[in-house]
């Protein structure tokens, strides 16, 4: 009986040894850096690093775009306020067409084309406008 148990113990040890050898080979193939899972893990790790760098660049670009957009929005609001003021000023103008001046009064009024050095009494609107290049920005 003892001999049978020794034979079974030896067979069990031999089976465990074969099983360990098979597992060792599978583990080597699994961790192979060129064809196995180790290579896939190495490639994925490199891709994660690249994506992290790209994400950081995108975040920096988003921050600068946000700052630019905020400044442009502020400028647009200021321009909109000025335009509202101009429209309000236009509503204050009379709706009636100018009256024809009788010929007697027309002869008495000086011709503005003949006397450009004289200051006229008509108000000049939009005299504080910015140059076109500055307004286009």
Image (tube, rainbow, N blue to C red):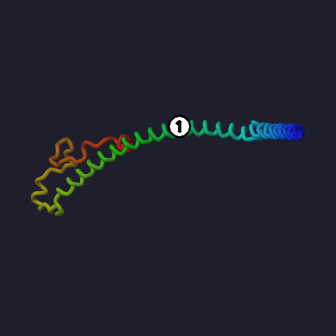
Q: Residue at x 40, y 43 (%)?
A: 69
Give the percent coordinates (x, y) of residue 22. 82, 40
Left or right: where 20 falls relative to 59: right
Front position in the image: 50 or 15 = 15
Residue appearing at x 40%, y 39% in the figure: 67
Q: Is the C terminus in the top left, top right, bottom left or bottom right quadrant?
A: top left
Residue at 76% of width from left, 38% of height from top?
A: 27
From the viewer's perspective, tell me whether residue 43 is left or right of residue 111: right
Label 1 environment density (alpha carbons within 10 Å; few <14, some 14–19, many ≥20): few
Residue 104, position as x, y percentages in the image: 9, 59
The image shows residue 31, relative to residue 85, as above or below, that is above
Horizontal side of 38 relative to 120 (left or right) equals: right
Relative to 126, residue 10 above or below: above
Of the 4 image quadrants, the one containing the N terminus is top right
Q: Residue 66 is drawn in which quadrant?
A: top left
| Residue displayed at 70% across by 41% down | 40
Q: Nearer the viewer, residue 35 or 7?
A: 7
Name the residue beneath numbered marker 1. Answer: 57
The percent position of residue 136, horizontal first and vertical second, equals: 38, 44
Nearer the observer, 21 or 33 = 21
Q: Position of residue 111 (x, y in %)?
A: 18, 51
Q: Nearer the viewer, residue 26 or 77?
A: 26
> Could you say whether the residue bearing mark 1 is in a helix, strand or loop?
helix
Residue at the limit of the structure toward the front, as seen here: 1
């Amino acid at each position: 009986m003892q001999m049978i148990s020794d034979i079974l113990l030896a067979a069990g040890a031999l089976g465990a040894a074969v099983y360990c050898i098979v597992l060792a080979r599978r583990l080597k193939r699994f961790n192979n850096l060129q064809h196995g899972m180790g290579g896939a893990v190495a490639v994925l790790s490199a891709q994660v690093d690249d994506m992290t760098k790209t994400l950081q660049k995108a975040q920096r670009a988003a921050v600068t775009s946000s700052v630019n957009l905020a400044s442009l929005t502020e400028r647009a609001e200021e321009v909109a306020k000025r335009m509202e003021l101009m429209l309000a000023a236009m509503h204050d103008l009379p709706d009636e067409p100018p009256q024809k001046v009788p010929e007697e009064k027309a002869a008495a009024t000086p011709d503005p084309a003949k006397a450009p050095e004289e200051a006229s009494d008509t108000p000049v609107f939009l005299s504080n406008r910015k140059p076109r290049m500055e307004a286009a920005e």
